[in-house]
Amino acid sequence: MRARIAAKSDDNQKAVVKALRQAGCTVAVTSRAGDGFPDLVVGRSGVNLLLEVKDGNKPPSARKLTPDQEQFHGTWSGQVAIVYTPDDALRAVNVLVQSRAVERFPCWSRGNLKPCGFEANDIDQRCSGCASQPQEWSI
């Protein structure tokens, strides 16, 4: 077993976590897990995403993945993203949530705003395309 080096979090990690939580995400800070595991585990609308937070204000050489992070990212078969700002993190989560919603609710792929294609004031209707029950959704 190799010696573990104390994990450091990037200066912008607190801002990223705050923005994600304000957007309704659940966030577990995992930056001390080690072995290349990403800094954050983020959940939203039934979807989970691992985020590696890098400080975009640092020079490119200081934003590189460590060898352990490269190995983890290369072998992880789930969703993982590298983000540099709170906006990057929000975009990554929203893109993943929207792509999963289109898979589960085909009517979204037709440009509708809600998973059943119903408008906000059409709460009692179902979409004929997916026939799922209307629910409150925010993305």
Image: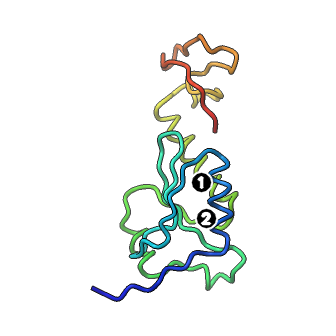
Residue positioned most to the top: 124
Q: Quadrant of residue 5?
A: bottom left
Q: Nearer the viewer, residue 132 or 111?
A: 132
- Read off the residue under disc 1: 92
Q: Name above or below for residue 129 compared with residue 90.
A: above
Q: Name above or below for residue 125 compared with residue 48.
A: above
Q: Nearer the viewer, residue 5 or 50?
A: 5
The amino acid on which the numbered mark 2 sits, given as a three-letter code, is Val
Q: Residue at x 65, y 28 (%)?
A: 113
Q: Are the residues at dot 2 and dot 1 in contact (C-beta closer than 8 Å)?
A: yes
Indicate which disc residue 61 carries.
none
The 10 Å Cα crowd at callout 2, few under 14, some 14 to 19, many 20 or more, is many
The image position of residue 134, as x and y in percent, is: 55, 19
Q: Residue at x 52, y 39 (%)?
A: 45
The amino acid on which the numbered mark 1 sits, given as a three-letter code, is Ala
The image position of residue 123, as x and y in percent, is: 62, 15
Q: Name above or below for residue 19 compared with residue 135.
A: below
Q: Secondary structure at mark 1?
A: helix
- Read off the residue under disc 2: 83
Quarter that holds the N terminus: bottom left
The image position of residue 115, as x and y in percent, is: 56, 27
